[in-house]
Amino acid sequence: MFATLIVSWIVYTVLRNVVRTTVRTAFISATTVVILHAGLGISPQDIWHQIIQLLQAFSQVLRVR
C-alpha cells in the first residue's frame, strides 16, 4: 500500500510538471504569434512557411554530408 502511494505521487508529480510545461510553452507560442501579427503584420502562415523553409534547408545540409 505504501509503495503504491509513493509511485502514485511520483506519477502525479511528473504529469503535473509535464502539463505545466506544456501550458506554459503553448501560452508563450500563442503570445509570440499574436505580438508578431499585431505589431509587425506577420501572419501565422508566414511563420509556418519560414519554419518549413528552415527545416528543408537543414535537411539539405544533412544530406550533403
Image: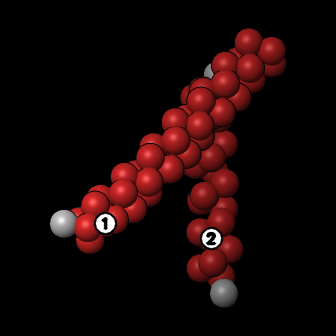
Q: Quadrant of residue 7?
A: bottom left
The residue shown at (44%, 46%) is 16
Q: Nearer the viewer, residue 24 or 55?
A: 24
- Give the quadrant of residue 19: top left
Amino acid marked by disc 2: Gln
Q: Is residue 37 above or below residue 29?
A: above
Residue where numbered disc 1 is placed: 7
x 55%, y 45%: residue:
21
On-image quarter of the C terminus: bottom right
Q: Give the residue at the far bottom of this rendering.
A: 65
Instruction: Find residue 40 and report its image quarter.
Output: top right
Residue type at the position of mark 1:
Val
Nearest to the observer: residue 21 or residue 1? 1
Residue 22 location in percent, x, y? 51, 43
Tell me residue 3's x, y (percent): 26, 71
Q: Mark 1 or mark 2: which comes first in sequence?
A: 1
Q: Is residue 5 visible?
A: yes
Q: Is residue 19 left or right of residue 65?
A: left
Q: Is residue 22 above or below residue 7?
A: above
Most distant residue in the front direction: 2
Residue in the picture at 74% in, 23% down: 36
Q: Secondary structure at mark 2?
A: helix
Residue under numbered circle 2? 60
